Amino acid sequence: MSGNRLSGRLAAAILIGGAVGSAAAADLMPGPYLKTYAGYSEGDVTFRTDDGSSRDFAPDGGAFGAALGYLAPLGQGAFGVEVFYGADDARSSDPLVPGQSDGSSARRIFQGDESFGASARIGGFVARRALVYAIGGWEWYRLENTAIDGAGERTTTATTYNGPSVGVGAAMPLFSNRLSLRLEATRSFFEDREGVDPEHDLYSIGLAWSF
């Protein structure tokens, strides 16, 4: 996925967050919170074949999950930490993959599975009540790699990748200071393992309950 497309979606999340937050009727409540979210998962997977050539795959699909976090005031803004667990059904198409030992009819599919991680976030308030923040953390992401040979036989391996995650988000109260809307966009960068070099983008909307 291009950097321009990611930047555009991050900017849209900030603008939406500011617009909704300006109409909010309460302040965000500091302290612990529980969050559920749903959204869109998109990957950028580079696969290197046996002969040294490469092919890019773009698995995409729905995503959902839950998180436990803590939000603390920090000057004119706030600082928070969060741990999360999620799952998605992102799946790539199965284009022909050149350079395989079983010939040009070989195909390959990448399928997202589960993810978990931890992150910190720091930001400032817009329109006094909407918090816009930067995100930095670490994600573990399980990715299934299915090879289909010329006879149609499938071999699937699952690998858990891990790496840094960065992004932006916006939070604003809904109806009371205990319930808040969360909009986030993140990108995770993983290590190259056995010829597979993935990245993972997640665009999510969630509800958090402070307690």
Image: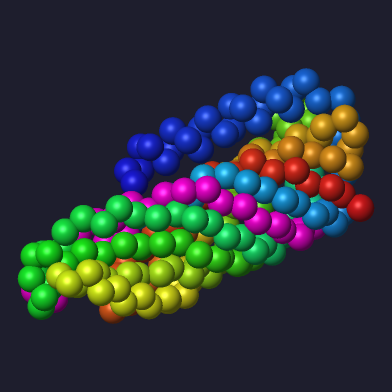
At a point 16% along the width and 63% down the height, the residue shown is 97
Q: Position of residue 108 (x, y in %)?
A: 26, 64
Q: How is the image coloured?
A: rainbow
Q: Position of residue 137 (x, y in %)?
A: 58, 62
Q: Which residues are magenta?
A: 45-70
Predominant SS of the magenta segment: strand
- Asked whether, in this view, residue 165 is left or right of residue 29, the answer is left
| Placement of 150 over or under 39, stated as above or below | below
- Asked whether, in this view, residue 122 is left or right of residue 33, the answer is left
Q: Position of residue 25 (x, y in %)?
A: 87, 25
At a point 79% along the width and 39% down the height, the residue shown is 180
- Asked whether, in this view, residue 118 is left or right of residue 180, the answer is left
| Placement of 122 over or under 145, stated as above or below | above
Specify whether residue 51 is painted magenta.
Answer: yes
Residue 49 appearing in the image: no
Q: Position of residue 151 (x, y in %)?
A: 17, 72
| Placement of 116 over or under 121, stated as above or below | below
At a point 49% along the width and 55% down the height, the residue shown is 89
Residue 155 appearing in the image: yes
Q: Nearer the viewer, residue 89 or 208?
A: 89
